Structure formats: structure tokens, C-alpha cells
Image (tube, grey):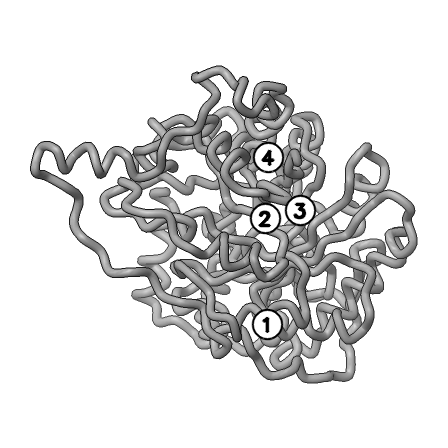
Amino acid sequence: MVPLVISHNGASGDYPDCTDLAYHSAIDDGADIIDCPIQVTNDGVLMCMSSTNLLDTTNVQRTTYNSLVSVVPDIQPQPGIFTFNLTWSDINSNVSTAKISSPVSGYFLVRNPRYTNQGKFLKLSDFLAIAMDKDLSGVMIIIQNAAFLVNSLGIDIVDSLTTALSAAGFDNHPTKEVLIKSKDSDVLVKLKQQKTKCKLVYTLPSGIGDASNSSLKDIKKFAEYVAVDSKSVFTLSSDFIIRQNSLVQDLQSAGLALYAEVFQNEFVAQPLDFFGDETVEINYYIQSFNLSGIITDFPKTVRRLAGNTCTVLGKDMPSYMQPPQAGSLAQFLQTFKTQPPSLPPMSTLNSSSVEEPPLPTVALRSVSDGSASGATKTPGTPSDAPTATVNAGMLLVMVFTALLI
């Protein structure tokens, strides 16, 4: 089975996350499904953005809005400027521009400098319109911080999304699928209780090597699919694969379908066993695991390999298409009486990590899917969302640090 090619923030390896350029490029590059992590603005507009912290995705620290730096412990311990601090027009103005992601900046590698600050962010309604108009299998919607939005902003993001999908015509579309992905089980439980027709995808925590039977039973109560961090598939030491964990086998034995994430082309992003070649890594996953989908920053790379007919030749497959033996490099080092540092087994996923209290219910604040504006707010004024003010010293550190990135 050829896995679906699913974008990660659009073609975010080539363009800034979740911009029009990233989404159109992902479609042109052969993605089957494009994704939208939904965030909420101060005036209640649903939009696509990879992080609710604008410091991660824009140059907002260089604008007059840098005075809105604050700490929101329910979201992250570090200071940030958040989407719910600004209106849609504030975020989408020429003052605040998109910023391309740099996941391997620690190696002084940057992405596509020609398009570092190009592209416009999209309202959810615009994203859904693009997906409806193009030849795609469907969309993947990622829900984040749902409990915070309910408790602190009075917004039920689950119901708001359901309304937006219905308005866009996805309710009973004969061919377009909707996948809803979240690391919060309470979100998926609520959707399951609403008897949604969307496919529910549970994002597993990072850093786990296997799953207990009780946790697998809990997951199956609300999800049919799981998204697995590729770094959880193997135990790594100094980027050498030491062993393959039992996580994938545990999940598939329980009848759960798998999406693997997130694949990147940079040569430092793969274990050394894959020779710094993303095609080799993807080939290993396609041939070794019965994956339902691959989530990637570079859809074109996955599409190119997924369409290679050599992958289905079985015993007649040429040697250059056969996947490497995971862990063979570490074993080879042992012949020279050297090896990477020993590591303990990775942690086990238990029920306590899966179960969450139900989402609280609220009297809904006015929320827009992007097709119409909600209540507006004077640009530059602080949000009424609860925040903890940062002292002046921390503010200066944040601003100057961001300017250097």
C-alpha cells in the first residue's frame, strides 16, 4: 500500500509555514492531504498557523506589537506574542510578515533564503476553499490548546471547527476526507461523542518506545489513527540507531493505523544509518512499516519515492532500492571496540498519559471561521486573555534575541 503524502504546515521546507505559497507548493508537489493547525485571533477569526506564538512564525518582534510580550503558562513557559493578542488584520498586515522555519538552525542550516519572509497567512475558510477547489484527497486539521481556549477565552474550538467544515461543504462531500489530529484526547473524545464523520488522529507523545495494552485500549475508544514521531520508532545514541522499538508493532497489533511524522530533507535530520539521505529514510519506512501516511515538510520528496514502481517488486527489487539494516552501523562500530553511549529503554505509554478530563462547556464567544470578521480590537492594545507581564529586562532580551535569528 502506498501511504498518503501529507503536508506539514504546507511545503514548509520551501516556504514559510502555513502561507498561501506553502499550501499551493504542497499541492503542486503532489501532496494528497494538506494540513492546517488552527489558531484563534483576538477578534475570533480561525486561521492556519503552525504555532500560536507569533515569535515562532513572524517578525512581530520588529513591530510596534513587541510590547505585547507575555507569559502564558498554560501554553508555554517562555515569553511570547500570541495570536489571541492580535486581530486578524494585525497579523495579516504588511507590518507583520511570515518567517520561514529553521528546525536545524543549530547546525547553521537555513531554508530557502529567497523566500524567507514571503507569503500570506490564510483564514481557515480560505484554506478550506483551496482544498475544496483542488484535486486533493482531503485535509488534516490540527487542534491545539483546546482546554485553554475554553477556560481562558470562552471559545469552543471543536464546535467552531465543526461549523466551519459544514459551511465549507465538507460535511457530506463524496470524495474529500477530513482528518482531525490532536495530542489532546479530550478533543477527540468530544468529537467521537458527537458522532463525527471525520477521521480522528491521536498524536502520541514524543520519546516513548512502546505502549501498554491499557493505553492502546483507551486510544481505540476515540481514535482510529495515530501519529507517531519518527524519533520514537528507534532508540538513538549520538544519531546512531541502537535498536528499533516495539511501538509500531504494538500499535498495529492493536488495529490502529499509523501516520509517521515529521520528515525533513536536511542531511542532519536523519539517523546516520540512512546516510544523510531523506529518500533512504522514507524508503525504509515505506518498505518496513504498513503506514497509512507520511507527514513531511517536503511533499515532493515523498511523492517522488512513493511513485517509484521498484518499491513493489518484492524479491525482484534491485539492491539499490533495498532499505539498510537499522542498527548495523552501531554493530559495525563494535568490531573496532567502540560504540555510542549506552541508553536505557525509552518510556512506555500508559493510560495515565492518554486519559484527560472532559473539555468544559462554555457560552460561546463570537468566533469566525474567517468568512466574516468578529469583534475588532484597537491594534497594539493588549488582549483581555489572561497573561503574566514580563519585566522590562526579559522583554529586551526577547526582542534582541529574536532580531538576531
Secondary structure of the residue carrying numbered label 1? helix
Q: CA distance from mark 1 to mark 4?
A: 35 Å
CA gap, disc 4 and disc 3: 10 Å
- Distance from disc 1 to disc 3, alpha carbons, whole Å, reads 27 Å
Identity of the residue drawn at 57% across and 51% down? 50
Decide: is 318 above or below 6: above
Q: Earlier in the sequence, mark 2 or mark 1?
A: 1
What secondary structure is marked by label 3?
A: strand
Per the rendering, the mark at residue 217 is 1
**Residue drawn at point x = 48 percent, y = 72 percent:** 72
Q: Secondary structure at mark 2?
A: strand
Give the residue type that dot 2 points to: Tyr
Q: Which residue is mark 3?
A: 35
| The C terminus sits in image quarter | top left
* Viewer-side label of 2, 1: 1
Front of the two marks 1 and 4: 1
